[in-house]
Amino acid sequence: MNPQELINKSSKKIWRKWSIAFKILPLIILVAALKFLSHKFGFEILELNALFTSLVAGTIFLIGFLISGVLSDYKESEKIPSELASTMKSLFDDTYTIFKAKNSENASQFLTYQQTFVSALMNWFYKKERTQSVLNKVSLMNDYFVELDKEGVQPNYIIKMKNEQNNIRRMITRIDTIRDTEFVGSAYAIVEAMGFLIAFGLLIINIEPFYASLFFTLLVTFLISYMFLLIKDLDNPFDYSAKGESGTEISLKPLRDFEISFDDFLNTNIKKN
């Protein structure tokens, strides 16, 4: 790996790690400017009290509630790409075994179809293909199963491949549900409202000395904004259409590796023949 590639790789890692912080930087600058103006023109009309600290504590509690709920889906989602790649690899292995054992033209065509399906699946992750279109492609595998059955392929092979087909369909449907369903939208709304109220309250609360007040205003605003955006990102771990695989999106490496190995294997062992 040359120095330029190392620099690019390091830059991508830094961006993925700090992308949310960079996103909220304009907000922090705006809040800092408003705090200076509030102090200069005498708009700091409130004193810090227990009710305000209770509001901050309540907001932190809601953030904890949101992130605990979102993380459960996120941890489940982490397993799906590797399971999906494993399922398709199993389907490929069974089809290739039939092809080698019987020199089946239908099995060869089915392998080529699986190759195009993997490409369509990767496009679907980036929302370049509709969910129903991908599910229809899964159903079209039945045509190959019928032809293999006519060739006299052992039923246990076809049953196993049908099970893999069902697993692929189930995981695609699960991914589609996760990325299109927002976790408790009303909870997001109340956290947004409370975050705004806290930021506004910090702008008009008088804390001496002023620079201590500015520091805590920016710190609390940064933490609440950061956690809110983090939760929003974690809520859709399959959102690749806008920014690709950033720091919070689930890695598609198992599927990419499978796609590359699948293409290489077919080009070497099937298409040459």
Image (tube, grey):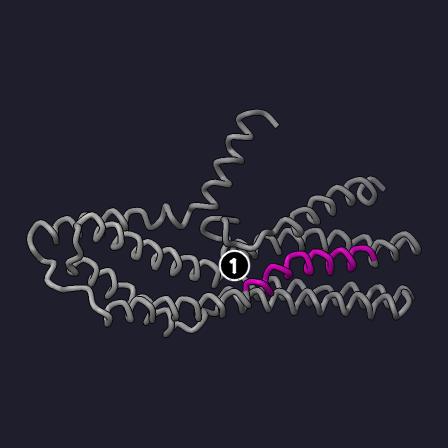
- Mark 1 highlights which residue? 237
Residue 208: % across, % down: 16, 54
Please report the residue visible at 34 percent of the width from the left and 59 percent of the height from the top.
Answer: 224
The image shows residue 189 at horizontal and vertical percentages of: 33, 70
Q: Nearer the viewer, residue 193 or 56?
A: 56
Residue type, numbered disc 1: Pro
As displayed, is residue 9 above or below residue 232? Answer: above
The count of marks equals: 1
Q: Residue at x 55, y 63 (%)?
A: 74
Report x, y in % for residue 135. 62, 66
Which residue is at 38% across, 61% downward? Answer: 228
Q: Is residue 105 magenta?
A: no
Q: Main secondary structure of the magenta part?
A: helix
Read off the magenta span: 74-93
Residue at x 27%, y 54% (from the top left corner): 216
Relative placement, left or right, of 69 versus 107 is left
Q: Quadrant of the N terminus?
A: top right
Q: Is residue 35 left or right of residue 243?
A: left
Quadrant of the image for the C terminus?
Answer: top right
Whole-percent x, y for residue 170 in the image = 65, 69
- Magenta stretch holds residue 83: yes
Nearer to us in this view, 112 or 217: 217
- Front in this rendered view, residue 28 or 4: 28
Left or right: 35 with respect to 18?
left
The residue carrying pointer 1 sits among few (fewer than 14), some (14 to 19) or many (20 or more) residues within 10 Å by Cα, namely many
Q: Quadrant of residue 202?
A: bottom left
69 is higher (above) or lower (below) than 221: below
